[in-house]
Amino acid sequence: MATQNSRSAARLMLAPAVILLLGWMLVPLTMTLWFSFRKYLPLRGGDQGWVGFDNYVRFVSSSSFWPSVQTTLIIVGGVLVITVVFGILLALLLDQPMWGQGIVRILVIAPFFVMPTVSALVWKNIFMDPVNGLFAHLWKFFGATPIEWLSQASVQSIIMIVSWQWLPFATLILLTAVQSLDGEQLEASEMDGAKPLQRFGYIILPHLARAITIVVLIQTIFLLSIFAEIFVTTGGAFGTKTLSYLIFQRVLESQNIGLGSAGGIYAVILANIVAIFLMRIVGKNLDA
Amino acid sequence: MGSISLKQVTKSFGPVDVIKPIDLEIEDGEFVVFVGPSGCGKSTLLRLIAGLEDVTSGHIEIDGNDATTIPPAKRGLAMVFQSYALYPHMSVRKNIAFPLKMAKVDQAEIDRKVDDAARVLNLSDYIDRRPGQLSGGQRQRVAIGRAIVREPAAFLFDEPLSNLDAALRGNMRLEISELHQTLKTTMIYVTHDQVEAMTMADKIVVLRDGIIEQVGSPIELYKNPRNLFVAEFIGSPKMNIIKGAAAEALGAPTIGVRPEHIEVSKTKPKADGAWKGTVGVSEHLGSDTFLHMDAEGVGTINVRADGEIELRHGDTAWLSPQVSKIHRFDAAGMAA
Amino acid sequence: MARAITNERKIINTVAAWGIGLLIFFPILWTILTSFKTEAQAINDPPLFLFFDWTLENYAVVQERSNYGRFLWNSIFIAGGSTLLGVIIAIPAAWSMAFVPSKRTKDILLWMLSTKMLPAVGVLYPIYLLFIQFGLLDSILGLTIVLMLINLPIMVWMLYTYFREIPGEILEAARMDGATLRSEILYVLTPMAIPGIASTLLLNFILAWNEAFWTLNLTAAQAAPLTAFIASYSSPEGLFYAKLSAASTMAILPILILGWFSQKQLVRGLTFGAVK
């Protein structure tokens, strides 16, 4: 519904954003693709020429590859499950009548504003340190041996830290969705004899579907690339090496650009698979 | 000045032809109403004239100049939208002043014109309010005020009264008619309500499926509908359409009789040709009585009778159509 | 709708919600408290809650060790600059998609969002090379551009959902009133969308403020923002909990306060208009 004039104006105004993003995507990606086919060690001889698919084969056959994919999926999946489940429960609780609802909401939303480097450092040292951490004190108080969180339960610890950061986001979106639920629908279902659990299953949960989709989409985008939380806490040790982190190490620590770039291409492919999958769902959900 | 002519104008959205080739002349100072059922293309036609949509083919001329490719801002037309489309973040004064500001008129001149318009439209008391604080009728007046100050070649109204309640609609109808008499500017008015069309128009354009069915003054359309569609669309209550033997008896495959052109009597009239019927529902309005009758061999007939007629559900009565006022249609539905 | 809610119910709700709220907030509260302790008190067993000798010494030490003000300014410049630059590019784009949609609009939107899923590490080295090439390494300008680009899809998306709620007729009215495209966007659309634009600005400011991949990898001494300031505490050196806490408090407090003041707009923004 528009004229030729406004359509060409629209194209013109869309152009900067599209061109910038296209450039941002294509230029570095092309370079990465180029490097991935070369033996390139900046500190040890520089660019030593074309090696075909060597880097790709080496990257996949490295013993760290599959564990890193697994770790990535476990961390992303774990955080998603925790934040969605607790987010729903917390949203339902916060929707109940109570005193000081506004203040509770402020308390709950706070972790979202904490930068990842800070939250990782605070959790690592002040809470999870096996000697002086608050958890260690707590364990000792109950006569237990303090856990060495970041080495004995490293992946779980990282999931916990990241979940703490993202729980507010999930809770807030789900709370908004819960609040928009038509009260009459619930009353009608009550009249129809639905018990609380049935009301949750048949009315509330379907109503939240859209909100849950949004939470999963946005969080996945950010979780696939978590970096600071691992960089600061374990540095990738103790089985916490995600695919991103593995590539980071290849590029920066071992200064093997070719190998790292091949890994980067794998990561792009993985991200695309996830993206296509998510976009399908979201695209559908956004029509409504 | 504000004469507008459409020459072979068409509009398609993808494969759908919303406007089939249309030719139309609108004289300067005329009040033209586009009327038709929803989806007939009347709003699209207005938006084509406004320049908010491109024509697919054909030409639009304003005051003799080809305006087909001129953007809406430069056509010198003003439009009043169905939703009023007021700027919610501006006061009434700023809303009305906006087109002048866009035209870079100097501030003293803007103030004078806005005050004039506000006075004419009884908006002076609300001039510093935001649209959100106004009633529907007041918003409508602001929208009109915004159109007036531009001194446009023509005003375009897109179903401007459809969001108002019935009483207010009647008032606004009068106000717009009065405005037209004062300004003597061309007005093009889109509505699906034939009462608005009949009461306000100098010229009515009846549209259906992107085609002009008939153009004429309200009385012409009422008296001489060109076809069945126009006959049924214009006039309230609707014209009775009769087919079959009862129609053949009066000399056409299909005939139409308006409810006000049927006489009702409780006893069988002497003259032939009266239909015997049973009263289904009678609506007593005081001034008139609307009878919904089931006539033997004819079908359902609506009659507009005297206000004090005493007929109730189940009563029998005789109906005599005024022969001179019967409309006859051929098999294709065209007036014979 | 209204139904009597027993006080008992309300008390239980209140206690439960406050309990959980405080639990979630506790790490931040504890960090702030620790920042006022001495190093010895910070690791005291049992932990000291409120009864310790409050001191500001840690803040002085942190400030002396690294110039907080400089990092703070870098953060403000980078987050603010990338957000403003982004919104200038995003508003026209969102206008196009919201008011002149075409068959490809949705594909473009989804594609934009998908660029956010590209793993940053995959392009770290090329970006690094490009930055060296253009002399952008460790510069505020460079980081501003990168953060603008990574947040641009979210900005466009958010503004798009806000704009779509504005009736197109109002913009058409402006066009009929003789407004040019520029006036239409500047005087009609933008003022009407102020709440949406504000929450877009806020959310992206926060995202840029907290971004911790590019800010860590593309800066050194000159352009390092607060994320890097705090990362310099990642290798322990003796007793440092109180100092770490002070530095952490300094890094998160500005955004925490900003976030609390604007949480209403934020919540709307965060839901991408998809949840009402």
Image: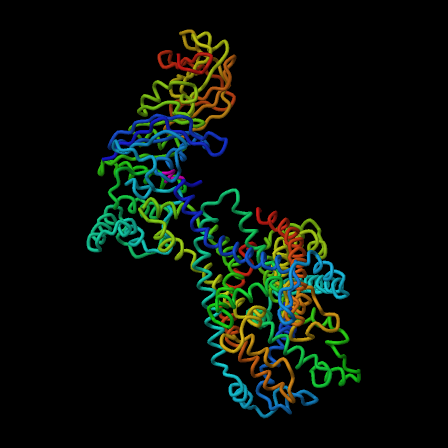
Q: Main secondary structure of the magenta part?
A: loop
Quarter placement of the N terminus of chain C: bottom right
Give B302 or C126, whichever is nearer the viewer.
C126
| Highlighted magenta segment, given as a residue range | B158-162
Q: Position of residue A284 (x, y in %)?
A: 61, 47
Residue A72, relative to residue A124: is it above or below? above
Is residue B159 within the magenta segment?
yes
Task: Please tell me which residue is depicted at 51% across the width and 23% down the height of the picture.
Answer: B280
- Looking at the rendered structure, the number of numbered marks drawn on it comes to 0
Image position of B308 (left or right of C135): left
Q: Is residue C271 visible?
A: yes
Q: Position of residue B84 (x, y in %)?
A: 37, 45
Image position of B269 (left or right of A175): left
Give B327 or B258, whichever is nearer the viewer.
B327
Q: Is residue C2 visible?
A: no
Quarter placement of the C terminus of chain C: bottom right
Give A217 or C151, whichever is nearer the viewer.
C151
Q: Position of residue B59 (x, y in %)?
A: 34, 30
Is residue C77 within the magenta segment?
no
